[in-house]
Image (cartoon, rainbow, N blue to C red):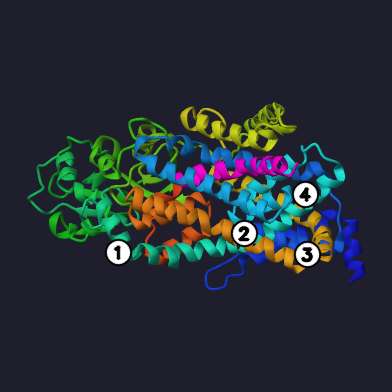
Amino acid sequence: MQEITASLHRFPELSLFVTIFFGTLIGRVRIKGFSLGSVVGSLIAGIVIGIFAKPEFPQLLRWIFFYLFLFSVGYSVGPRFFGSLRKEAIPQIILAITMAITGLATAVTVASVLKFDEGISVGLLSGSLTQSAALGTGLNAIAALPVSDEIKAQLSGNAPLADAICYGFGDLGLILFISVFGPMMMRANLRDDAKILEAQLSGGGAAASPLLVGSRFAFRGYRVENSSIAGITIDELEERYAVGRLSVQRLKRGDELISPMPQTRIQIGDLLVIAGLRAMLANADREIGPESDDLEALAAPLKSVTVVVTKGSAVGKTLREMAADRQAARGVYLASLNRGEEEMPRDMGIKVERGDVMRLVGSPQDVERAGKWLGYIEADLTKTDLTFVAAGIACGVLLGLLTFNVNGVPLGLGTAGSILVVGLFAGWARSHYPVFGSIPEAAQRVLADVGLIVFIAIVGLGAGPHAVQAYMERGGGFFASIFFGGMVVTTIPPLVGMIMGRWIFKMNPLMVLAGVTGAQTCTPALNALREASGSNIGALGYTVPYAIGNILLTIWGPVMVAIMHSLRK
């Protein structure tokens, strides 16, 4: 055992990756659907390994990874954050802001009553509200406090310890509120509420027969033998079966392949290669003619593209309105619709927002046409503009140098907050001017996941020895006070959010709970809401509060430090 701990101390890079390895394993453990996740798992693993190994890392290392994380978060949330600032989203915006302020006020009150220092206070905030980024921005603020290095080290060790103590109930408590206590207090049946919303979004019809959605589309060839369609044009045939999203991809007349034009007239014996929803094609052999397996005709090229919605002509439209525009939507099928990291339901009443990512399938010319109408097509999903990333982080660092003092406390965005803000504007700029700054979604996730997990792992490794010292000096009662204080901070904001959403804004109970989940940036709770409601429709109420909450809770880190430092002076 001594040899192992000596090796981990001698080679800190080994202790770091061992921590991440065990942390991700801990994060995968599920008990009745609940898991701590990789971030909290890495923090716990880091504390435990740090107790024995005591590895040493340069301070700059953890901040480099945290800055990459902050910029990527700002970049990904930017389009949704600015896109959410619209009239119809006002209830969700107010809900998110109210919950964020309530969370901060509750954390300050609890920390003051229990006489917590700045480090424990910011860990209480970040863990209880499940926002690990607030831990990072809080640690950044602690490093700038006008106190001795010894006190800074103590405060920096207290913060991740409190975060680890509070985070478990931060997740579990919100999951229980979302899936059990919230519906009980509102006397709501989430499955019924989901069906009501789905019916509204599908226009009162069956949500399973959308016009634009392409998850059930098929590609078939039919020999024309039905005289009722002989002599009509391609455009007239497609109009007749518009509900089934029919489009003629190819026409073979005799041995000649003809590019079908809207005014091309159909003749008996023609071979039509058709794309459309499977339900519509079920009767095609009777309404058109027998199915054909002519390999030459069926070898029509298909293309799948990823499109980012930026054009004003598409933003704010429903999928139904888009499908009705046959000039733009003809021959194009929607495989998925994503808003940030969440996949949206594809009911016909769903409104498309700026920054949404749509994966389209169709012929090359059709998807290229639709892509230009919607926004821009991600040409290279493997290429990241590192120049843009580096320039953004550098601008954030420079902006973070601007501070002013209030009662001896340095106030300002700080380096961490500034990088987050620059990332917000960078993501917004990319959505409006897509000629620069490409960071594919997969690259955003890598930057965010690796950046945060490495940062948290290093923080945990450094906090390990301090955890033992804190326990020896203050005992288990001190740890218990942090845990119960965290329970209070976790519980109050959702209660306030529920009251506001349900009884002030008269929102659907499912949308209320989705908004509460988003405002508290708790993805596991959203998954619990999906299971409880049997639907993904709640994601619609999650994205706007998530964008607002992500920013405000991250900013609360240095705000919490500044408030507690002022109160303790």
Q: Position of residue 453 (x, y in %)?
A: 68, 53
Q: Amino acid at mark 4?
A: Ser
Residue furthest bottom in the image:
32
Whichever of labels 1 and 3 marks the residue nearer the N terminus, that label is 3
Q: Amino acid at mark 3?
A: Val
> Which of pointers 4 and 1 indicates the residue nearer the eye?
4
Q: Residues within 10 Å of mark 4 (few under 14, many from 20)?
A: many
Contact flag, marks 2 and 1 (Cβ < 8 Å): no
Question: Disc 4 marks which residue?
Answer: 156
For this rendering, which residue is in front, 41 or 441?
41
Q: Which mark is residue 192?
A: 1
Where does label 2 land, which residue? Answer: 486
Label 4 vs label 3: CA separation? Answer: 17 Å
Q: Are the two marked residues, 2 and 3, in contact with CB atoms closer than 8 angstroms?
A: no
The mark nearer the N terminus, 4 or 1, is 4
Q: Indicate which disc residue 48 carries.
A: 3
Which portion, as a residue range, is magenta? 544-569
How many C-alpha atoms fall within 10 Å of the one at disc 1: few (<14), some, or many (≥20)? Answer: few
